[in-house]
Amino acid sequence: MAFRINSAIFRSKSRSILSFLKTDLGCTANMSSANGPKVFVSRRIPEKAKALITSQCNAILWEKDEPPPRDEYLKAIAGIDGLFCLLTDKIDAELLDAAGPNLRVVSTMSVGYDHVDVKECAKRNVAVGYTPGILTKATAELTIALLLAATRRLKEGIRAVENGEWGTWKPMWLCGQGLDGATVGIVGLGRIGYTVAQCLNPFGVAKFLYSGGRRPDAEVELKAEYADLDRLYAESDFVIACCALTPETAGMFNADAFKKMKKTAVFVNSSRGGVVNQDDLCAALQSGEIGAAGLDVTTPEPLPTDSPLLRLSNCVVLPHIGSATHDTREAMAVLAAQNLIAGVKGEKLPSQVE
Ligand code: DGY
């Protein structure tokens, strides 16, 4: 076994005497279900999910907000039956090999699973769990917050107030573009894209264009029009990226795409940083090829503080907080825990990547 139990740092208080033991890798070994399946939880997670896991599994908990260094991660997972991971953990062949042949499930606490090599998992008969659905509303809400922040110039406004640049009320100062009468183009009308459109509709949006998979329901409910990307870029006042990161979408928002957009277009991305060519976006924002951008995701994350994007007044960057409401994060963690537990029992996962 990869761990030596350091009995000097017992943490059990009111819990059972063998409740939690610190290991020499900085993890906490939960011994309350010592005979249960062995699982590794790669981050500090909401209590409710932790309790669910530790009630049924022999859990090794990395109880920190920062991920384990890769070498420690690889050591910690040796011989596990199940892995609870986050979107920042690269789950590739090396890691799956380090886990070994007992591994039955990789459960990610995210709807995106571009960080998991699903093919390598399938080769090893490892089920992959994810958390679709429950973060849709929170992420749509944040996408709209970003859109409004970018188009109504909130970053410049807040800075002006804080820097004492707020003079008298001026008719032309900090004007942006409203949603009333606008055309909104959504690239990827999946769960989140659809909800974004539903929420934007009452703002008086004149037309929704969308690309990606066909959604007849959106064409009825929102009168959304399916459009090829050229048309979507050319006609949209707002272009919102809601598509998953795949080999097909990687870097699709590039110089070519920005050139096709309106000079006033507001570009919003709450999916994955990898769908954008960030240098091209920066150049488009600097040269006035497009009007503004709102990003909740970047490459890399965290975005270095010397990134030129952060110096642009027409670019709002948030730290990947689309799903960050208390209830949503707890629900995501609980669903990921349920996926993990079902997986180690050899059952079908409640939300399984097919
Ligand atoms: C996800 O779940 O994939 C989001 O990016 C974070 O909630």
Image (tube, rainbow, N blue to C red):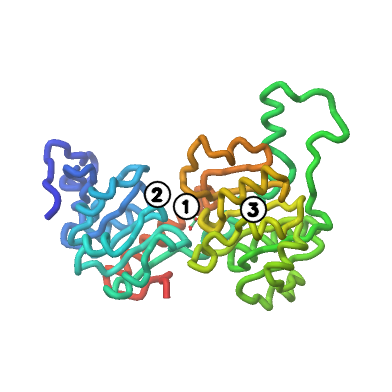
Q: Residue at the location (66% across, 60% down)? A: 257
Q: Is residue 224 above or below residue 285?
A: below
Dot 2 amino acid type:
Pro
User: Is residue 203 left or right of 268 when viewed as pictured?
Assistant: right
> Mark 2 against mark 3, which lies toward the viewer?
3
First in sequence: mark 1 vs mark 3: 3
Whether the residue carrying mark 1 lies under 8 Å from ligand 1 is answered with yes
Dot 3 amino acid type:
Val
> Mark 1 against mark 3, which lies toward the viewer?
3
Per the model, the C-alpha gap separating discs 1 and 3 is 22 Å
Q: Residue at the location (24% across, 55% down)? A: 59
Residue named by callout 1: 329
Residue 36 location (% of width, % of height):
20, 62
Dot 1 amino acid type:
Arg
User: Is residue 39 left or right of 167 when viewed as pictured?
Assistant: left
Whether the residue carrying mark 3 lies under 8 Å from ligand 1 is answered with no
Is mark 2 in CB contact (under 8 Å) with mark 1? yes
